[in-house]
Amino acid sequence: MTDLEQQLRAAPMADLDRRGLTTALAQRAGKAALLDVAYAEIDSPIGELIVFVTPRGLLRIKYADEPIEGVLADVAARVSPRILRAPARTDEARHELEAYFGLRRRSFNLPIDWSLVHGFAGRILRRTAGIPFGDVRSYGQLAALAGSPRAARAVGNALGSNPIPIVVPCHRVLHADGGLGGYSGGLDRKRYLLALEGSLPTRD
Amino acid sequence: MSVHLPPFQRLVDDHAAELHRFLVASVGFVDADDCLQETFLSALRAYPRLRHADNLRAWLYTIAQRKATDAVRGHRRHRASDLDGVAEERLASPPPTPGDDALWISVRGLPAKQRAALVHRFVFDLAYRDVGERMGISEEAARQNVSAGLRRLRKEVDR
């Protein structure tokens, strides 16, 4: 090996400033309208949440036990692959969620991007978005509101597919007899949210 | 058939460090950060139009190579207009930055493919087949670019 080759192998090195890169990329991509989906982690009393926002609004909230890779791949395929981790773009969602968990806010002003929701599930989830803080509905009541009174089970499935838990409050839907029913994020989280809002059924 | 492109953040997570190293060697510390941002922004712009996701790494390196060339040319233009008429060989390279020496300034002055091939071959210590794969060229073309680059550098160093 020649001296020249040896010198080339000893190239100058510098550490990459990942945080700086993330910030700069998110900012420049946003300005150039190249950032279709931004996401970031948010701490909450029911575990880390990852929120996804688009220029249209809040797209997705992921609980800690869902693998991030699958959610990212799904969003890439169904919305856009132009996805970046961009904490600054999720500030509004973070502030509203923190205020909600701190009982300083009872409803969300965040616009919602319904891109991940279609058909029957979409109708049910839009109805669900209107259930106020501190209130609950039964699966049957939601089915009736959606014009299919006997579709309580289908309503359960629709709620289970809710891409935006907490903000689209599917935790406010219970069995008519006060039983908790199901929750895609696990019943502990449903119980926590209902208790926070003062509407946990006493028999549970 | 639709293409399944990974979320763009995955490309940043997987390749930012190596692209940064490539750019530090190609353009120096001062310009490497901006070149890296430019690389990812250009990639992000074109990303949804990609027809396949077979070799995203080589695609990113191709863009980085172009950004490095833009940066080198940018300096050349600036210096040429700043120092009108003081045309010297040295003006063809960007200003030295900390950690730079004459050899790396000469590397920056090489044609883009020779520069990139030398960096892949020696800085990353790759076999010619892998150099070719990263550059999207044949193994033989990779070998030729490396030897042409070395020849040119030797001439400059000996001078």
Image (cartoon, rainbow, N blue to C red):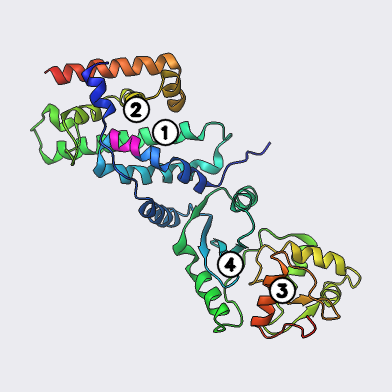
Labels 4, 2: front one: 4
Q: Which three-letter amino acid code belongs to the residue tagged 3? A: His
Using the rendered view, name the quadrant where residue B26 is placed: top left
Q: Quadrant of the C terminus of chain B?
A: top left
What is the spatial separation of the Cα atoms under label 4 and label 1, in whole angstroms? 38 Å
Of A35 and B156, which appears nearest the observer? B156
Within the magenta stretch, is there residue A105?
Answer: no
Q: Which span is picked out in magenta?
A: B21-26
User: Neighbour class for label 4 at 10 Å: few (<14), some, many (≥20)?
Assistant: few
- Numbered label attached to residue B116: 2
Question: Where is residue A31 shown, x and y percent of the image?
Answer: 42, 57
Q: Are marks 2 and 1 in contact (CB under 8 Å)?
A: yes
What amino acid does circle 2 point to? Ala
Between disc 3 and disc 4, whose residue precedes?
A: 4
Seen in the image, is B40 located left or right of residue B151? right
Q: Nearer the viewer, mark 4 or mark 1?
A: 4
Same chain, labels 3 and 4: yes
Identify whether A47 is placed above or below B103.
below
Q: Secondary structure at mark 2?
A: helix
Identify the chain of the residue marked 1, using the numbered disc in the image: B
Q: How many marks?
A: 4
Residue B109 occupies quadrant: top left
Q: Which mark is residue A171?
A: 3
**Element carrying mark 4:** loop
Q: Which residue is at the front of the view, A81 or A162?
A: A162
Which residue: 45% across, 57% down?
A: A30
Across and down, in percent, residue A3 comes to: 21, 19
| Residue behind mark 1 | B61
